[in-house]
């Protein structure tokens, strides 16, 4: 099953993408030949039972893993042809990540956590600090720049993670169960923030097992046994 991109063009194109893991003497086909296009500016939720392939899909989209076979193009660039250094450059240029477990560094302040991608981009300290302050303000944490993760609530930590994902001004935000560790009220705040980012033109692809969270996305992709089962 294939879905065409919006008239704005394709952000991500997958063609017969397969991912096979060797588990002892067995082959596990986490993705079994997925063809899919995510259009620029679209907001997708990927759903499916455990083992359906949704997390593997997100890892491949994020260039954190490589397909066993098939073709993946990110803004028309053939990801499979890139070495590790070029792959890292591509991640920094196009992608921002939000994880269920926040993945903040506990020893660093809010400002320092947000600045991390800018360090790898070679930004100087002054401009990095200005950018971090701007993003912290955008997610409602302008008064928490000097705090460390342990001094923040779960929702505040996730907002720091969103700010960090935005530091490099990515075209695409990949979110892996971004509300999985949050209560319903805080989840709604994070989803409102993602909705605003999508309205500002960001492409968002989110993995979730919660139907009410998925309903906030513009489109939904259901996976089963490493394949696309249906789309809404």
Image (tube, helix red, strand yellow):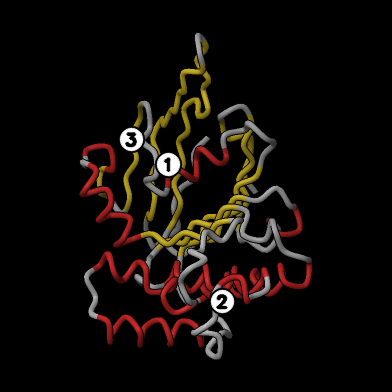
- As helix, strand or loop, the secondary structure at mark 3 comes to strand
Query: Is residue 36 found left or right of 73 in the rendered image?
Result: right
Can you identify the residue that label 3 sits on?
Answer: 71
The numbered disc on residue 60 is 1
Q: CA distance from mark 3 to mark 2?
A: 31 Å
Q: Are marks 3 and 2 in contact (CB under 8 Å)?
A: no
Residue 123 image point, x, y percent: 24, 75
Of callouts 1 and 3, the N-terminal one: 1
Residue 45 image point, x, y percent: 60, 53
The numbered disc on residue 196 is 2
Q: Nearer the viewer, residue 115 or 176?
A: 115
- As helix, strand or loop, the secondary structure at mark 1 comes to helix
Query: Is residue 187 found left or right of 62 in the rendered image?
Result: right
Q: Nearer the viewer, residue 23 or 43?
A: 23
Q: CA distance from mark 1 to mark 3?
A: 11 Å
Q: Nearer the viewer, residue 51 or 109?
A: 109
Residue 87 can be seen in this image: yes
Q: CA distance from mark 1 to mark 2?
A: 25 Å
Of callouts 1 and 2, the N-terminal one: 1
- As helix, strand or loop, the secondary structure at mark 2 comes to helix
Neighbor class of circle 3 (other Cα within 10 Å; few <14, some 14-19, many 20+) is some
């Amino acid at each position: 099953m294939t879905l065409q991109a919006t008239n704005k063009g394709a952000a991500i194109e997958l063609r017969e993408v397969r991912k096979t893991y060797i588990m002892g003497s067995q082959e596990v086909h986490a993705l079994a030949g997925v063809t899919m296009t995510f259009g620029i500016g679209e907001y997708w939720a990927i759903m499916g039972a455990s083992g359906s392939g949704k997390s593997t899909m997100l890892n491949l989209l994020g260039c954190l893993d490589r397909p066993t076979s098939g073709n993946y193009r990110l803004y028309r660039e053939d990801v499979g042809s890139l070495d590790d250094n070029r792959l890292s450059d591509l991640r920094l240029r196009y992608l921002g990540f939000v994880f269920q477990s926040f993945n903040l560094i506990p020893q660093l302040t809010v400002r320092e956590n947000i600045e991390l991608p800018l360090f790898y981009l070679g930004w100087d300290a002054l401009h990095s600090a200005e950018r971090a302050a701007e993003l912290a303000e955008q997610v409602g944490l302008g008064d928490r720049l000097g705090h460390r993760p342990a001094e923040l609530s779960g929702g505040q930590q996730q907002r720091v993670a969103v700010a960090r994902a935005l530091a490099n001004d990515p075209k695409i935000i990949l979110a892996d169960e971004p509300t999985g560790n949050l209560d319903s009220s805080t989840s709604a705040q994070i989803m409102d923030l993602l909705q605003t980012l999508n309205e500002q033109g960001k492409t968002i692809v989110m993995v979730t097992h919660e139907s009410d969270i998925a309903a906030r996305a513009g489109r939904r992709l259901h996976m089963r046994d490493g394949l696309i089962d249906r789309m809404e």
